[in-house]
Image: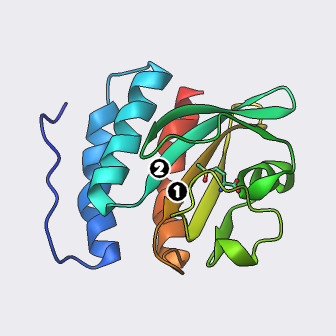
Amino acid sequence: MAEELIITNNLSKEEKYKELYPQIFALIQGEDDLIASLSNIMSALKYGFGWLWVGVYFVKGKELVLGPFQGPIACTRIQLGRGVSGTAWHKEEIIIVPDVNEFPDHIICNAASKSEIVLPILNKEGEVALILDVDSDKLNDFDEIDKEYLSKIVQLIEPLL
Ligand code: SME
């Protein structure tokens, strides 16, 4: 396992993902504990990109329950179909919200959050088991590049479920 994350300044978003992805891959090799690997992945993403909040929610019954994250304290429980996260779970699709104030049912866990991307993570049965939620304090901070590379990171997590 790497001792320290290598993060180069002034890279484009795609270059940064390309620098981080192999490090995230290496970080979780040989570690089958889900919480340990999720914790390091959230840290690598948070410190790699400087986003406001990066974390996961676990599907538990009809609720999402907060899991490993990096950033300010967050809502601990979100109902199915509520907020961006609950909607991504319900619809089983990736949601990019360029301006959270324009999302009708956005749940404000932190007033500094301006845009977000949420990705469902599936278990071996093909059910949503986790939600990856990334929040930025900048408007319109997420696009197709985030969708592509965060999906690759989701694919690293899925075998652990
Ligand atoms: N804004 C999210 C809630 C979770 S966090 O921001 C950490 C939502 O609407 O689902």
Q: Judge from the rendering whether residue 105 lies leftward or rightward of residue 134; answer left or right.
A: right
Residues at discs 1 and 2 in contact (Cβ within 8 Å): yes
> Picture coordinates of residue 159 (x, y %)?
55, 32
Q: Is residue 14 above or below residue 91?
A: below
Q: Judge from the rendering whether residue 150 lies leftward or rightward of residue 29; answer left or right.
A: right
**SS class, disc 1:** strand
Residue shown at the point (32%, 23%) measured from the top left:
30
Mark 1 or mark 2: whose residue is earlier in sequence: 2
* Number of the label disc, if any, that sits on residue 6: none
Q: In the rendered image, which quarter contains the C terminus?
A: top right
Q: In the rendered image, which quarter contains the N terminus?
A: top left
Question: Is residue 114 in sight in this rendering?
Answer: yes
Q: Single out the residue that lies furthest toward the front.
A: 111
Q: Quadrant of residue 99?
A: bottom right
Q: Judge from the rendering whether residue 12 lies leftward or rightward of residue 150; answer left or right.
A: left
Q: Single out the residue that lies furthest toward the top.
A: 33
* Disc 1 residue type (three-letter): Val
* Number of the label disc, if any, that sits on residue 134: 1
Residue indicated by mark 2:
54
* Disc 2 residue type (three-letter): Val
Instruction: Say which of 68 and 74 sits in front.
Output: 74
Instruction: Say which of 4 and 21 sits in front.
Output: 4
**SS class, disc 2:** strand
